[in-house]
Image (cartoon, rainbow, N blue to C red):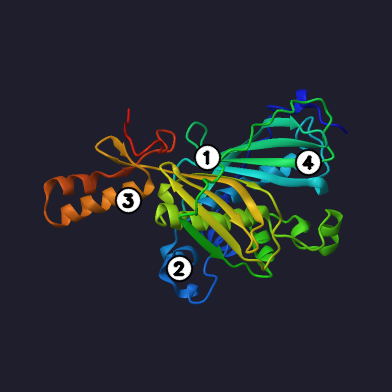
Amino acid sequence: MPIDAAAALGATIAPFTSAWDADDVILYHLGVGAGLGPGKATDPAELAYTYEQRLVVLPTFAVVPAFPGLVQAVTGQVPGLAVNPVMVLHGEQDLVLHKPIPTSGTAEHRPRVAALYDKGKAALATIEVESGPAGDPLFTNRFTLFARGEGGFGGDPNSPPPGHQPPDREPDTVAESPTMAHQALIYRLSGDKNPLHADPDFAKLGGFDTPILHGLCTYGFAGRALLHAVCGGDPARFGFMSGRFSQPVLPGQTLVTSIWRDDAGAVFQTAKPDGTVVIDRGRVRVRALSFDGTVRGSCPQAIQQRLEHLLLAARGDPVGVEHALGAEPVDQDQQLVGGQGEVYPVA
């Protein structure tokens, strides 16, 4: 049945609720490589993701509770959006963190078809899932699907042009992340049971010689690298991440994330060691810190400012004490950092 753009575009999907706890969070973290590598299993920095006594949540965990919204979209539960699930590829992923994710919680998720384009031989659909209380969401996912063989329905062909091209210079940071041969078998336990990532026969039906790694697993590996390289390992600084999936990854391959910092956060690419880009046009944006109602600089700049105030406080400087105690994260909806380190008044 062909796509009916008039019925599908803007259609809402029945809201659903999901809950998670520390075990769900740790399982996801293991699925995206936490604790993987020589000496990493007992590294205090990694134990923050793998040990419940000191647990913090990776921002990209947000894709897990919202994922059923994507499943609903590709299994015929959206009016006018009938597609063959075997022929659907995950094309792009945008994630907005409105606030840090708690280690356990419950959230209502509200999916809708936010965009739909006719690319001739394929359809491009964006499923937006807002999660958390209406009007005060915790996070928002935008899953963009590339449905092969579903084009030609007469819809708008003019999808937005790709952005976030890396600058013409060497990256500021390069992070290498090994994956395991059974990485996909771990990641699928976080809810994506698509047999494409486990069953060799099903993978062949989709045009692949062997099961491939989940795109969102690759996304999580890149997110871990970005969190540490751009936000100093602080999830509260992580405001937004987007990327385009350009090539499949096989479990066991190493992921190389190249990062170019700027005043908004960073542009990134994730590739295989041979240079084949697997996440392209990537962007991460960071939250600012607020001092006395003023947002200052980008993530590294804000952290530096905070450290300076803490140093002054340690020396007994009253201004340093005041600023060190008064620093609070700025809400994502108020301000994402941009420009050249300008100072932004907060209303």
- Crowding at mark 2 (Cα within 10 Å: few <14, some 14-19, many 20+): some
In the displayed structure, does residue 154 sit left or right of residue 94? Answer: right
Query: In x, y percent, where is residue 232?
Result: 39, 56
Which of the two discs, 2 and 4, labels the residue nearer the N terminus? 2
User: Residue, x 32% and y 31% (percent of image)?
Assistant: 346
Which residue carries the number 2 mark?
Answer: 47
For discs 1 and 4, the disc positioned in front in the rendered view: 4
Give the distance between the C-alpha atoms of the residues marked 1 and 4, in whole angstroms: 28 Å
Mark 1 vs 4, N-terminal side: 1
Which sits earlier in the primary sequence, circle 3 or circle 4? Answer: 4
Q: Which residue is mark 4?
A: 147
Which residue lies most toward the bottom here?
Answer: 39
Q: Quadrant of residue 290?
A: top left
Vertical position of residue 120 compared to residue 62: above or below:
above
Kind of residue at badge 3: Ile
Q: Nearer the viewer, mark 1 or mark 2?
A: 2
Q: Check residue 132 in the rendering and tell me which mark sits there, or answer none.
A: 1
User: Tag 3 or tag 2, which sits nearer the N-term?
Assistant: 2
Q: CA distance from mark 2 to mark 3?
A: 22 Å
Q: Amino acid at mark 1?
A: Gly
Packing grade of label 1 (10 A; few <14, some 14-19, many >=20) is: some
Q: Is residue 208 above or below residue 73?
A: below
Q: CA distance from mark 3 to mark 1?
A: 28 Å
Quadrant where the image shows the N terminus:
top right
Q: Mark 3 and mark 4: span between their CA atoms?
A: 42 Å
Could you tell me which secondary element the residue under label 4 belongs to?
Answer: strand
Q: Is residue 30 left or right of residue 47?
A: right
Which of 113/206 is in front? 206
For residue 268, above or below residue 53: above
Residue type (three-letter) at the residue carrying disc 2? Leu
Asked whether residue 28 is in view, the answer is: no
User: Is label 1 in a helix, a strand or a loop?
Assistant: loop
